[in-house]
Image (cartoon, rainbow, N blue to C red):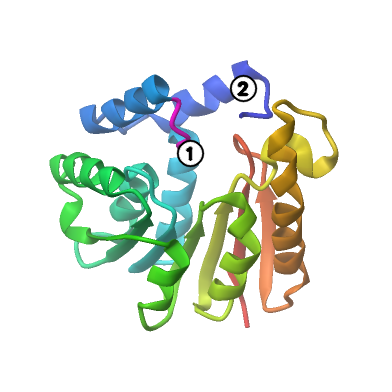
Amino acid sequence: MALLPSEVDDYLTALAGVGLSDVVLDEMEARARELRFPIVGRAVGRHLELQARAIGAQRVMELGSGYGYSAYFFARAVGEEGRVICTDGDPDNAAHAEGYLRRAGLWDRIDYRVGDALESFAAVEGEFDVVYCDIDKDGYPDAWEAARDRVRVGGMFICDNTLWSGRVAGLVVEPPEYDKVTPAITAMTRAVADDDRYVHSLVPLRDGVLVALRVA
C-alpha cells in the first residue's frame, strides 16, 4: 500500500520509468498485478538501485526475493562482476526469477537459494555491501540481529514495509489480522535506530523503506 496520494505515487512511478524500458520488467509488474503478488514497485526498485550504486555495492544479500523483482535492480547496480544472493522458500518463485532475470541478461549475477532466508544467510560466509530485508514481517527482528554485524562499514541494511500501511504510527487499517506483526516491525526499526554504528532514515516511498548506513 502506498501512503502517498495516488497521484503522487503514480508520478514517482512514472519518473522511475524514465530511461528504463524493459519488456521483462513490464511482465514482472503485470504478474504482480494479476496475482496480487507484493513487489516493491518501480519507484522503490530505482531507489534500491541508487543506494547500491552509491556505495559501489558488489555483494548483496536479499532476505526474501520472491520472483526476483528487487533482485533485478540490485543486479543492475552490482554490474557484471557483482553478485546478488537471493533467498525464498518457494521453488516456483526461484524458477520464475530465473526465467525473468535470464531474459533480462542478469541471471549470471544471481545466486538463488531456495529455503529459509535466515538459514541461507547463515550458510554464506563474509560481509556484505547491502543486506536487504523483505521476509515475513514477524521475522524482521531476527533478520536485523543476523545482519547487523555482517554489513561492512560503509555498507547498508535496507528493509521494506517499515511503515506497514501506517500501522506503525497507530493508523487503523484493514485487514486487522495484519496488526499482529506490527510490533515486530517497530521493534526492528527501533533496534536499528538505537544502534550507534548506523545512521538511518525511513523513506516514505510506497510502504516505507528503512535505509541504514553502517558508519562504525
The spot of residue 43 in percent (x, y) is: 49, 35
Real-space CA distance between mark 2 and mark 1, rounded to the nearest whole angstrom: 16 Å
- Amino acid type assigned to the residue bearing label 2 in the image: Val
Quarter of the image for the N terminus: give it: top right
Position of residue 200 in the picture relative to residue 122 (left or right): right
Position of residue 129 in the picture relative to residue 90 (left or right): right
Which secondary structure dominates the residues rendered in magenta?
loop
Residue 57 showing in the rendered view: no
Q: In which quarter of the image is residue 33?
A: top left
Q: Residue 52 shows which numbered tag? A: none
Mark 2: which secondary structure?
Answer: helix
Q: Residue 8 shows which numbered tag? A: 2
The spot of residue 23 in percent (x, y) is: 22, 27
Q: Which residue matches tag 1?
A: 40
Residue range in magenta is 36-40
Between 26 and 68, the one lying in front of the other is 68
Instruction: Please report whichever mark, 2 or 1, sits nearer to the chain's N-terminal start.
Output: 2
Is residue 97 one of those drawn in magenta?
A: no
Position of residue 128 in the picture relative to residue 159 (left or right): left
- Amino acid type assigned to the residue bearing label 1 in the image: Val
Quarter of the image for the C terminus: give it: bottom right
Between 212 and 192, the one lying in front of the other is 192
Count neighbours of disc 2 (C-alpha within 10 A) and say few if under 14, some if 14 to 19, many if 20 or more.
Answer: few
Q: Which residue: 43% across, 62% down?
A: 117
- Taking the view exactly as shown, the residue that stands out farthest to the top is 7
Mark 1: which secondary structure?
Answer: loop
Between 5 and 126, the one lying in front of the other is 126
